[in-house]
Image: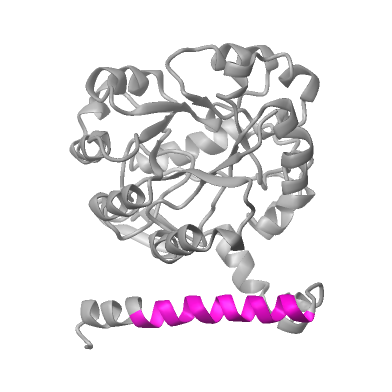
């Protein structure tokens, strides 16, 4: 039985400012958090990386800034280089290689790469052996035998199965303990459980990262509402904290990935391939359009006791004070207004 759950978190570049405030709080006030939870890694990629896959990335902070933060707090940083459509000519990309060189430099913890392409896997093993490798969920491993074979590959430190295998407990329990240690479950997938076009969806993102004009229209039930996290807990593959403590840890599984999707995305301009445009994603439009339907602050606070409300208010006030003290002066200086 495992006693500690390691969470692998999204937004390495996109949510940098959040982590800059959150990580000191997590270190200095562990009493605010479950004592059975740890941060295993934070994953993401800089924007405009052709090796990227799974999603089109955003974020304005440099790899050096990101690495300085994760190394300071002893957290592994992972690059989401899960493009499934790479060709040999893409391997020489200067930006992607430069990022890998930075991440491969040994610090307090080892960094890794989430990968789909066998071509890229072989290249990384040859040129950046310092980086550990993670088999991406974009492979859509729904067949149990294929998943088990993937887990047994020595190249991978971790394997993320398709979320539809999350509750296959009988089959999962046949794995040896070293194999269980390699399994990383995607907890909060919002996609339709019955989706048959998942690979095509990921391939469309891979094409976008390669600069190709490609649009994938989701035909799943409720797709018109956009990609919303409110759907995650209704998904049959959803893994909550009770599931982790009562089912997964007792079975010997300890790695859990949280998915993060942004409200904006970067897409190459069809009229000028050198330009990248930023606009709302389907989720962003849904969240924006649905604001008037969201519950009030008072409704959201209803489940909390008075003492819990006071503690939440204290923590939020503390975070706001830190933000105003440390980030706002930097923001004004950067914009030339202070």
For residue 310: magenta?
yes
Does the rendering let one see residue 175?
Answer: yes
Work out whether 2 lies above or below 119.
below
Tell how many labels.
0
**Residue found farthest to the bottom:** 338
Residue 106: image quadrant is top left
Q: Where is residue 207 shown, x and y percent of the image?
A: 41, 37
Residue drawn 62% across the image and 22% down it: 180
Residue 69: image quadrant is bottom left
Work out whether 163 lies above or below 332.
above
For residue 178: magenta?
no
Residue 197: image quadrant is top right
Does the rendering let one see residue 295?
Answer: no
Q: Main secondary structure of the magenta part?
A: helix
* Magenta highlight range: 306-325
Residue drawn 46% across the image and 20% down it: 156
Q: Where is residue 10 shown, x and y percent of the image?
A: 49, 49
Q: Where is residue 318 shown, x and y percent of the image?
A: 50, 79
**Left or right: 332 as drawn, with respect to 152:** left
Residue drawn 67% across the image and 15% down it: 175
């Amino acid at each position: 039985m495992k006693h500690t759950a390691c969470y692998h978190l999204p937004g390495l570049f996109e949510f940098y400012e959040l982590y800059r405030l959150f990580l000191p709080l997590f270190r200095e006030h562990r009493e605010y958090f479950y004592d059975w939870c740890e941060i295993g890694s934070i994953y993401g990629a800089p924007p405009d990386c052709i090796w990227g896959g799974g999603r089109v990335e955003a974020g304005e902070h440099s790899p050096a800034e990101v690495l300085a933060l994760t190394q300071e707090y002893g957290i592994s940083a992972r690059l989401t280089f899960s493009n499934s459509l790479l060709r040999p000519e893409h391997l020489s990309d200067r930006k992607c290689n430069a990022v890998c060189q930075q991440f491969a430099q040994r610090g307090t913890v080892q960094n890794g790469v989430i990968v789909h392409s066998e071509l890229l896997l072989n290249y990384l093993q040859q040129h950046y052996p310092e980086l550990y490798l993670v088999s991406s969920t974009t492979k859509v491993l729904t067949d149990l035998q294929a998943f088990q074979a993937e887990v047994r590959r020595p190249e991978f430190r971790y394997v993320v199965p398709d979320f539809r295998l999350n509750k296959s407990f009988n089959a999962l329990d046949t794995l040896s303990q070293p194999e269980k240690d390699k399994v990383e479950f995607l907890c909060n997938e919002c996609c339709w459980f019955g989706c048959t076009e998942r690979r095509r969806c990921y391939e469309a993102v891979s094409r976008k990262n390669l600069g190709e004009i490609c649009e994938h229209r989701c035909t799943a039930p409720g797709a018109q509402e956009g990609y919303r996290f409110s759907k995650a807990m209704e998904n049959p593959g959803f893994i909550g904290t009770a599931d982790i403590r009562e089912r997964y840890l007792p079975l010997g599984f300890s790695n859990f990935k949280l998915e993060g999707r942004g409200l904006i995305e970067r897409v190459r301009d069809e009229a000028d391939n050198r330009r990248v445009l930023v606009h709302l994603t389907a989720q962003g439009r849904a969240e924006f359009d649905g604001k008037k339907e969201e519950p009030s602050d008072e409704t959201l606070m209803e489940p909390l006791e008075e003492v819990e409300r006071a503690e939440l208010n204290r923590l939020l006030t503390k975070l706001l004070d830190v933000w105003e003290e440390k980030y706002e002066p930097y923001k004004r200086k950067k914009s030339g207004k202070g």
